Image: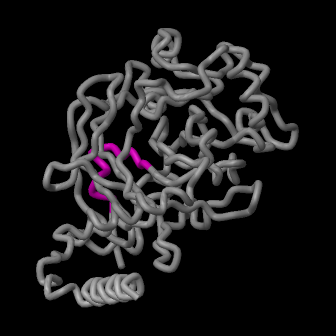
């Protein structure tokens, strides 16, 4: 009997505790809401990390990718962009694209890939200008080109950048018979892998490398509240006259040039990106009277465009082999949305040709 009374007492006490737990015993007023919603989002992201086992954040896009891909050094390939060379091949698989003018106001591109092994055709591939391998270094990338200006030769031979090129492994490249040289030079992903292996380059990121750009956490979105409307962005290059159009449904900027859609002929898809960064620089001519010498150190102005808005930024770079930092109007490093990014390098004298519209 006494044992039953004890058990009944324990049961009553347990019920009281349960009720107290549900009502908070009048203490719920002491529970504070999170003061910083961003911190709450970060906690949520951390709690869901288990869903990304075997994956890591990509240095190129800020997205979760397979761990092997996240640890692999990218390649940065020089891509021909003259009208006779389009459509290009494989370029839609790049996570980063740099576009800059070369001789005669045409532009050339550098496409940065961290997955390229299975690409059947990449190109057409063109020659180096000195500023491109410096951009490649900022991503710890292996730089791929065929030919070079004489002003780039000393830098390429200095060991400051790892390269696969006509200088050291011509076997990585081939020419197609259906196009006229020099617009018919291509490579396969597997052939470039063979070139990297032959040159005995490291295939994983340098241990000291910690990334170049700052990205939003996966699942979070950067919106430029103080930005101006940028549904259509015209870069102002004189020959290909490219522009981007924003598609709010997917949050992507779709690329156009030479009066039409910019297409990859491997999959017939239009190129697009999550972010556009415009960097305005000083440029002069080398003694040959045609090759551009771009000033990439010091500081200058630019634009950051994402999610239908554009915001003025500044850039700075302390040394030739350093990283370019892009800063918002508060002097803080910009945060990119996850996904692909297109960098446009524009000469200061043409900066007024950059336009934005709804």
Q: Position of residue 299 (x, y in %)?
A: 21, 37
Residue 350 shown in magenta: yes
Asked whether, in this view, residue 299 is left or right of residue 179, the answer is left
Q: Position of residue 121 (x, y in %)?
A: 77, 43
For the image, the number of numbered tags is 0
Q: Work out which quarter of the rendered image holds the N terminus and state it.
A: bottom left
Residue 121 shown in magenta: no
Asked whether, in this view, residue 106 is left or right of residue 283, the answer is right
Asked whether, in this view, residue 288 is left or right of residue 9, the answer is right
Q: What residue is at 38 percent from the left and 39 percent from the top?
A: 212
Q: Quadrant of residue 15?
A: bottom left
Specify start and end residues of the magenta stretch as a single range: 343-354
Q: Is residue 290 above or below residue 224?
A: above
Q: What residue is at 53 percent from the left and 30 percent from the top?
A: 141
Is any part of residue 291 visible from this angle? no
Is any part of residue 54 visible from this angle? yes
Q: What residue is at 56 percent from the left and 41 percent from the top?
A: 70
Q: Is residue 9 above or below residue 103?
A: below
Q: Work out which quarter of the rendered image holds the C terminus and state it.
A: bottom left
Q: Position of residue 269 (x, y in %)?
A: 69, 64
């Amino acid at each position: 009997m006494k044992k039953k009374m004890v058990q009944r007492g324990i049961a009553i006490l347990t019920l009281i505790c349960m009720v107290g737990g549900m009502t908070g015993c009048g203490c719920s007023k002491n529970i504070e809401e999170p003061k910083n919603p961003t911190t709450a989002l970060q906690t949520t992201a951390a709690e869901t990390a288990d869903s990304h086992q075997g994956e890591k954040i990509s240095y190129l896009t800020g997205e979760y990718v397979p761990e092997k891909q996240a640890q692999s050094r990218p390649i940065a390939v020089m891509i021909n962009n003259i009208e006779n060379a389009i459509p290009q091949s494989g370029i839609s698989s790049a996570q980063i694209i740099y576009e800059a003018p070369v001789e005669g106001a045409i532009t050339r591109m550098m496409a940065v890939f961290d997955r390229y092994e299975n690409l059947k055709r990449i190109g057409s591939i063109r020659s180096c200008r000195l500023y491109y391998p410096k951009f490649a270094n900022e991503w710890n990338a292996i730089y791929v080109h065929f030919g070079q200006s004489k002003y780039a030769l000393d830098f390429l031979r200095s060991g400051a950048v790892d390269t696969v090129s006509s200088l050291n492994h011509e076997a990585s490249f081939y020419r197609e018979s259906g196009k006229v040289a020099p617009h018919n030079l291509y490579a396969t992903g597997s052939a470039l892998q063979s070139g990297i292996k032959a040159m005995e380059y490291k295939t994983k990121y340098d241990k000291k490398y910690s990334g170049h750009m700052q990205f939003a956490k996966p699942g979070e979105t950067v919106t430029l509240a103080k930005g101006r409307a940028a549904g259509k962005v015209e870069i102002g290059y004189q020959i290909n006259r490219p522009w981007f159009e924003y598609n709010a449904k997917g949050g992507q900027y779709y690329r156009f040039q030479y009066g039409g859609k910019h297409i990859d002929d491997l999959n017939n898809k239009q190129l697009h990106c999550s972010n556009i960064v415009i960097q305005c620089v000083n440029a002069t001519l080398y003694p040959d009277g045609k090759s551009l010498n771009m000033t990439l150190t010091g500081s200058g102005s630019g634009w950051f465009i994402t999610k239908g808005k554009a915001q003025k930024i500044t850039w700075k770079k302390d040394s030739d082999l350093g990283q370019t930092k892009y800063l918002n109007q508060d002097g803080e490093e910009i945060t990119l949305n996850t996904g692909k990014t297109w960098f446009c390098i524009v000469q200061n004298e043409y900066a007024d040709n950059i336009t934005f519209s709804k």
